[in-house]
Image (spheres, rainbow, N blue to C red):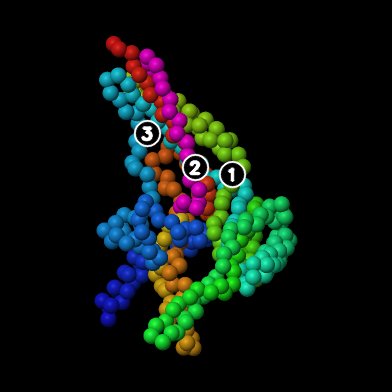
Amino acid sequence: MKKIMFSFYLFAFIAMPFCSIGQAAGNWYYNQSKSGKSIDYSGSINNANEAYNYRQPQQQAAYYPVYSSNDTSFTVEAKVMMNVKADEYVIIFATSQVGETIENCHDVINKRLDNFINSVLPLGVKKEDVFIDFISQFPIFEVEVEKKLFSKTYNEIPKGFEVRKNIHLRYKDSKIVEQMLIKASQNEIYDIVKVDYVINNSQAVYDSLRATCVRIINEKEKEYKKLGIKYDSKYQTVRDDISSIYPLDRYSTFTEFVKYTGDVTKPGSKSLSRSNVPALYYDKQAYTGYDLVINPAVIEPVVQFTCNLTVKYVLKKQ
């Protein structure tokens, strides 16, 4: 009995780190695959040999800030990241309507969308921050079986129509999302396509990162001079690499410790209505290899800006 209990606790301890709570990434995630790998919705990848490496935190390769050199040149680098909270957000809901006629489809779906828009206005969403994107309309057919003496003929006949529209909403307060989701479901709108994070002045962020990189390189030069390194160069070259990482690209799957399954026809049983929906969590870009991370402690998805400044010194021939 002791051995059994020890095995259970050991299993629970190993599995516990995977029991994280993920933020909503929208339906966009389910149509994507990372690095060409086919992801199943249980939190694993189809290639078992790569499963372990794939689930590890996504980090950059090892980075050594100390200068590299040869006979004629050497380089000094600075790499800085800044976590920036979004100024605004744009959420996209998808909806559809089936009806006997095109006119009926548009009338019903427009009424649902109007009711939804009016319900979120008290939350702080303005009418000018709402856009209806018409996606498609197409006929729906059903198959009619025509029985003959020695055969059957299957004929497609028009049954009705389906209209699809997306609604885009811009907002600034992330705390109203939950109420927006409730209002959407009350109007039979369930699909969240994605949430975009908007930074109004990204140039100011890059300017700040670049200035920080310059300061770090100047400090490194002072430290390297203590080693006897001479900066009497023939000329210098500078390379400036900037990038941004948005939350939509940083959601990962994890294996749930407990999944409830059962027979819904039996009283008290627990089941999943959509067992193929993956468990997600926000996995920010790792800080490995950066000289400095500004605003490192984040409790919500953020936009991660990076700047890598490299100065190459070509030495004079002695």
In the depicted structure, whether residue 299 falls above or below residue 278 = above
Q: Find numbered disc 2 in the image and state the secondary structure of the residue it sits on.
A: strand
Q: Are marks 2 and 1 in contact (CB under 8 Å)?
A: yes
**Kind of residue at badge 1:** Ile
Q: Nearer the viewer, residue 155 or 270?
A: 155
Q: Is residue 212 magenta?
A: no
Give me the residue at 50% from left, 32% from top: 210
Q: CA distance from mark 2 to mark 1?
A: 11 Å
Q: Residue furthest top?
A: 318
Q: CA distance from mark 3 to mark 1?
A: 29 Å
Q: Which residues are magenta?
A: 231-250
Q: Residue 65 — which label? A: 3
Q: Quadrant of the C terminus?
A: top left
What is the crowding at mark 2: few (fewer than 14 residues within 10 Å), some, or many (at least 20)? some
In the depicted structure, whether residue 118 falls above or below residue 309 = below
Residue 31 in the image: x percent, y percent? Answer: 45, 59
Earlier sequence position, callout 3 versus callout 2? 3
Q: Find numbered disc 1 in the image and state the secondary structure of the residue it sits on.
A: loop
Side of 281 relative to 39 (left or right): right
Residue 23 in the image: x percent, y percent? Answer: 51, 60
Which of discs 3 and 1 lies nearer the camera? The answer is 1
Q: Quadrant of residue 9?
A: bottom left
Q: Find disc 2 in the rendering and name its residue.
A: 244
Give me the residue at 39% from left, 53% from top: 34
Q: CA distance from mark 3 to mark 2?
A: 21 Å
